[in-house]
Amino acid sequence: MKLITTPSKVTRLLLIIFLTLSLTGCLHWVRAFQTYLQLSEFDQHFTIDDNDTFIVYFNDPILYSNDFLLLSKLQPSDKQVIKGGKKWRYRFNKVDVEQKLTKPALNFFFDLKFNQQQRISAWVFSSLFLEIAPPKFLEASLRSLAGGKLDKEKRQLKASSHVKIDAKLPQKEKVVGRLGQPIEIKDEGDSEVYYYHFLLETAKIEKGYEERALSEVKLTFDKTTQELTKMAGRFAGLKISIKYRRYLLDDKK
């Protein structure tokens, strides 16, 4: 699916989607698609703050908190009332093959902040997650979503590689040093793939979506350079896959 940029086509498409989905009570998909369209004018609709953590601010919020619940089917780990709205934290704990907590304990989290109208106003990534998705690469992948391919069947958005950055790939020693040993390592020729499991700490999961609580993170390392070249995983129902080399200015592969 190619991104439609002509205003008249966008208007017609949104009208068709709105009329079709509203009949079945799926307006959350309309708002999700509207948020996707905002990515084509990223700097107008979003602001990035990567000074201490990594925060994506939604300048013109569209999605409601209930929209996120309907899309993810997962309740947050914690809910908190904050100034100007509320905050939800989705906490993922590292587990072994039997889904038991590892020792020492390790986790990462996402925070979603909502304004007084219950719309998502900010998305915060914890420092541990930034070990496998460094800020420069994470921002590049978000900016690239505007030119990505939308797979409605798999409910997955694949980023394009039109954004280029001057950055260094994460090193295996540092990444594994933070995450610890994986549950499995697979040899794939020139690469090694490290598998990690993280379990969402949540009070409620909608029946039939229990598997979404388990996040399998796959990290691909180049055997020669020991660099992290790809990260793939599913977090609270959201699939993320980043091929780091395609964003490098001097990419030769």
Image: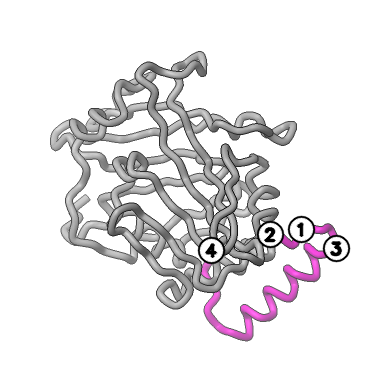
SS assignment at label 1: loop
Which dot marks residue 23?
3
* For residue 105, above or below residue 215: above
SS assignment at label 4: strand
Which dot marks residue 29?
2
Q: Residue at x 44, y 17 (%)?
A: 96
Q: Residue at x 60, y 45 (%)?
A: 79
User: What is the three-letter code of the residue carrying label 2?
Assistant: Trp
Q: Residue at x 69, y 65 (%)?
A: 30
> What predominant SS class does the magenta segment belong to?
helix
The N terminus is located in which quarter?
A: bottom right
* For residue 63, above or below residue 95: below
Say whether marks 3 and 1 touch (CB < 8 Å).
no
User: What is the three-letter code of the residue carrying label 1?
Assistant: Cys
Q: Position of residue 111 (x, y in %)?
A: 49, 49
User: What is the three-letter code of the residue carrying label 4?
Assistant: Ser
Bounds of the magenta segment:
1-29
Residue found at the far bottom of this picture: 8
Q: Nearer the viewer, residue 2 or 44?
A: 44
Alpha-carbon distance for marks 4 and 3? 28 Å
Q: Give yes or no for residue 14 being in the magenta stretch.
A: yes
Q: Nearer the viewer, residue 131 or 163?
A: 131
- Residue 33 lies left or right of residue 179; in this view the side is right
SS assignment at label 2: helix
- Where does label 1 land, which residue? 26
| Mark positioned earlier in the residue sequence (3 or 2) | 3
